[in-house]
Image (cartoon, grey):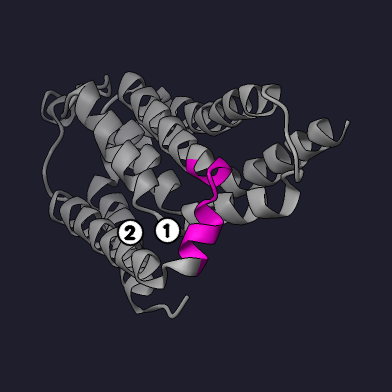
Amino acid sequence: MDELLAIASIVGVIIIGAMTPGPSFIVVAQISLANSRSHGIAAAVGMGLGALVFAGLALLGLHLLFMQVVWLYVAFKIFGGLYLLYLGIKIWRGAKNKLMSEEKGSTQPQAGQSLTRSFYIAFMTQISNPKAALIYSGVFAVFMPTETSIWFPTLLLPALLFVETGWYVLVACALSAKASRQIYLKSKSWIDRIAGGLMGALGIKLLTSSA
């Protein structure tokens, strides 16, 4: 019973965390709008698998590792901040680039990058986010029972994968819809600049934060 309560508590907190807007949301949203639903879903899978990496590391004691090896977290934070800043600049610089569908006068999605590339960008965004690492390690440290059976990770890890991937699949489906795409095509440059600016700001905040 304690393990079931722990799983429910961990999953509940992660659901709230996943739904909180941040770098992951911006990336999935931008990929879904600029490419297609398939690309958005590929990005959602990348986010889910990235979260699964943190969940696995949290089970192995990531929280204790960060506490004992401070420089490791600092290095991780610098890498994450630089990666978000890089993505922000890239999105900003691509704001004026027309989509293939826009050039053809159509609102049908035309892929500007491969599905693999969409997956890779999302996966890297997730695993380079030290805040996500801290959330997972902290939540596991608080709610994980002192002793667990073999079925604890067997149930918990798939549940977390489903939650993270499922949320971003919903985001991808909503933002790749025809109405959403028409709005995006009409205001692409401004939307991309806002997305790029937010991403860059998050990167700078991460680089300059003390925690």
How far apart marks 2 and 1 lie (CA) works out to 15 Å
Label 2 sits on residue: 199
Q: Main secondary structure of the magenta part?
A: helix
Give the residues drawn in magenta, as a range: 57-67
Q: What is the x, y in percent for residue 113?
A: 16, 28
Give the residue type that dot 1 points to: Pro
> Could you classify mark 1 by the number of other residues whose Cα lies within 10 Å: few (under 14), some (14-19), or many (20 or more)?
many
Frontmost residue, 99 versus 183: 99
Q: Is label 1 in a helix, a strand or a loop? A: helix
Residue 88's disc is none
Drawn side of residue 69 relative to residue 139, left or right:
left
Residue 140 sits above or below residue 199 on the image = above
Drawn side of residue 158 relative to residue 85, left or right:
right
> Could you classify mark 2 by the number of other residues whose Cα lies within 10 Å: few (under 14), some (14-19), or many (20 or more)?
many
Please identify the quarter of the rendering in which residue 116 is found. Answer: top left
Frontmost residue, 80 versus 148: 148
Give the residue type that dot 2 points to: Met
Q: What is the x, y in percent for residue 190?
A: 28, 55
Sequence-wise, the earlier of marks 2 and 1 is 1
Which circle, 2 or 1, is nearer the viewer? 1
Residue 42 lies within the magenta run: no
Label 1 sits on residue: 130
Residue 160 sits above or below residue 136 on the image = above
At x 59%, y 44%, the residue is 19
Residue 100 sits above or below residue 62 on the image = above
Q: Is label 2 in a helix, a strand or a loop? A: helix
Frontmost residue, 203 versus 110: 203
